[in-house]
Image (cartoon, rainbow, N blue to C red):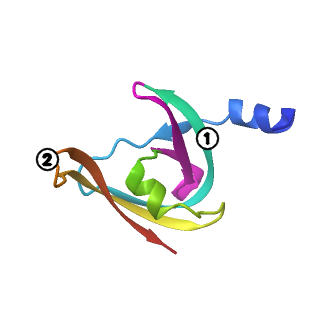
Amino acid sequence: MNDEEISSKLNTIVRMWQPQAMEQFIGTFRYEERRTSQHGETTVLVFEIDGGELLGVWENVILADALKDVQPGDRIGIKFLGKQTNKRNTQYNAYHVVRG
């Protein structure tokens, strides 16, 4: 990453998505970046939504699989389905992803 790209990211505000069940958005994938959360280092997927706002989504296994070959400029819709329980009785965040 060159100095211009670093400067651009320093001046860019990415709002992190904290959805409620059944909340959704449609946006254009822009880039991914590494961030540290309370769970350690993880990937944030950054989308541009209506009005040019940048929306960050914490990546999880479901989103990583659904978006494994996403490219900048791809149109994506993501709906948060809420917390669900798997066969091992472990809760996880479930999503429905549609690619344009």
Vertical comparison of 51 with 8: above or below: below
Tell me where residue 1 sits by quadrant.
top right
Q: Nearer the viewer, residue 29 or 43?
A: 43
Q: What is the x, y in percent for residue 21?
A: 23, 52
Does the residue at mark 1 contact the one at mark 2 (Cβ under 8 Å)? no
Q: Which residue is mark 2?
A: 89
- Marks counted in the figure total 2
Q: Secondary structure at mark 2?
A: loop
Is residue 54 visible to the viewer in this orientation of the structure? no
Q: Residue at x 79, y 39 (%)?
A: 5
80 within the magenta span: no
The type of residue carrying mark 1 is Glu
Q: Residue at x 40, y 28 (%)?
A: 39
Tell me where the magenta segment starts and ends, as one range.
38-57
Q: Residue at x 85, y 36 (%)?
A: 2
The type of residue carrying mark 2 is Asn
Q: Which residue is mark 1?
A: 33
